[in-house]
Image (cartoon, rainbow, N blue to C red):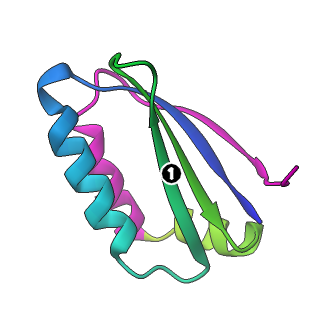
Amino acid sequence: MYGTVAKMRVRPENVATLREVMARQSAAPMAGFVATHVLQENDSDVFWMMAIFEDRETYDRNADDPAMHERYVEYRALLEADPEWHDGAIESG
């Protein structure tokens, strides 16, 4: 599996909206998509999102898809700044 982890600072008034957007976007079909998980760091404005794909090829294909950019623009509007991205292979323990 392959994916990304994003550290995001959410504007406090947008927390509920971000949850709704992430839930809706995660339910939309994407080739090779496995799951998205979001962690809110101890009731703060910091959220960590992990998007998981079957492999790097499907991840890269999704990243290059104009529809993914549209999804990004939608949730980026709810954040204080651009997310901090960390891409890589996903291994389980």
For the point 34% across and 19% down, the residue is 43
Q: Residue at x 35, y 23 (%)?
A: 81
Q: Position of residue 69 (x, y in %)?
A: 37, 58
Q: Left or right: 67 with respect to 50?
A: left
Q: Secondary structure at mark 1?
A: strand
**Quadrant position of the N terminus in the picture:** bottom right
Q: Is residue 68 magenta?
A: yes
Residue ID at (30%, 60%): 23
Task: Report x, y in % for residue 66.
Answer: 39, 68
Residue 51 location (% of width, % of height): 56, 55
Magenta span of residues:
66-93
Q: Nearer the viewer, residue 7 or 62?
A: 7
* Residue at the spot 47% in from the left edge and 71% down from the top edge: 65
The question of residue 33 being in magenta is answered with no
**Which quadrant would residue 24 be assigned to in this image?**
bottom left
Q: Dot 1 corresponds to which residue?
A: 37
* Amino acid type, mark 1: His
Determine whether 81 is above or below 31 in the image: above
